[in-house]
Amino acid sequence: MELKLHRRYLGEGYTIGSLYIDGAYFCDTLEDVDRGLTQSMPQEEIRRRKIVHETAIPTGTYRVIVNLSPAKRRMLPRLLDVPGFGGILIHRGNTKSDSSGCILVGENKVKGKVINSTQYEKRLVEILTEAQERGEEIKIEITNHP
């Protein structure tokens, strides 16, 4: 299964994107500030540019699994091997203060926020859990608007 997150608005305080599942639009996303990080950058460069809990993860392609988040106490999609970051999840939330580096899902109908995020998290977890149970590899590609 292939997820694509296309960051379409890189704001001063947050990042808005669109999430696609196997080419079909699924929902909007909200992340922390994009600081121009890429998966291919040296770790030292990522650490230099990153502001903890205030930086979107590097663009690139990552494996995704669904597993129990000890902090959130529920099953959530987890991105693996994100350089310079750990514990990156896709989950519900409304503002960048809910993100802490993670990807929030919902509808971007309010400037700087996503709403109705719980229903999108639940549906995404269902879809990805079913794919994982079928033995499919799940990947997410994160890109920026040109």
Image (cartoon, rainbow, N blue to C red):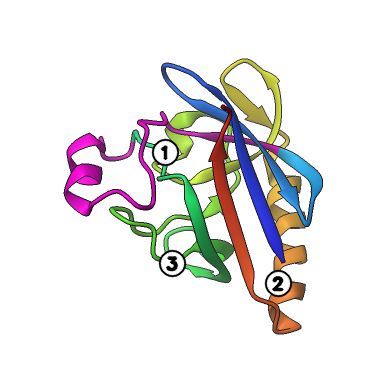
Residue 79 rendering spot, x and y as whole percentages? 49, 61
Amino acid found under the numbered disc labelled 3: Pro
Mark sitting on residue 56: 1
Please say whether residue 129 is one of the residues in the magenta stretch. Answer: no
- In depth, the one of 68 and 131 nearer the eye is 131
Decide: is 127 above or below 142.
below
Q: Residue at x 46, y 45 (%)?
A: 59
Q: Quadrant of the C terminus?
A: top right
Q: Could you tell me residue 143's position as x and y percent?
A: 55, 41
Q: Residue at x 34, y 33 (%)?
A: 54
Q: Which tag, 3 or 2, sits closer to the chain's start? A: 3
Query: Percent from the top left, x then y, of residue 68?
Result: 52, 71
Q: Amino acid at mark 2?
A: Thr
Q: Secondary structure at mark 1?
A: loop
* Tag in front: 3 or 2: 2
1 vs 3, front mark: 1
Q: Residue at x 77, y 64 (%)?
A: 127
**Residue type (three-letter) at the residue carrying disc 1:** Ala
Within the image, what quadrant is residue 139 found in?
bottom right
For the magenta stretch, what is the residue range?
28-53
Among the two numbered marks 1 and 3 on one chain, the one whose residue lies closer to the N terminus? 1
Asked if residue 48 is among those painted magenta in the image, a careful observer would answer yes
Earlier in the chain: of badge 2 and badge 1, it is 1
Label 2 Cα crowd, 10 Å radius (few <14 / some 14-19 / many 20+): many
Name the secondary structure under disc 2. helix
Write down the residue under mark 2. 129
Q: Which residue is mark 3?
A: 70
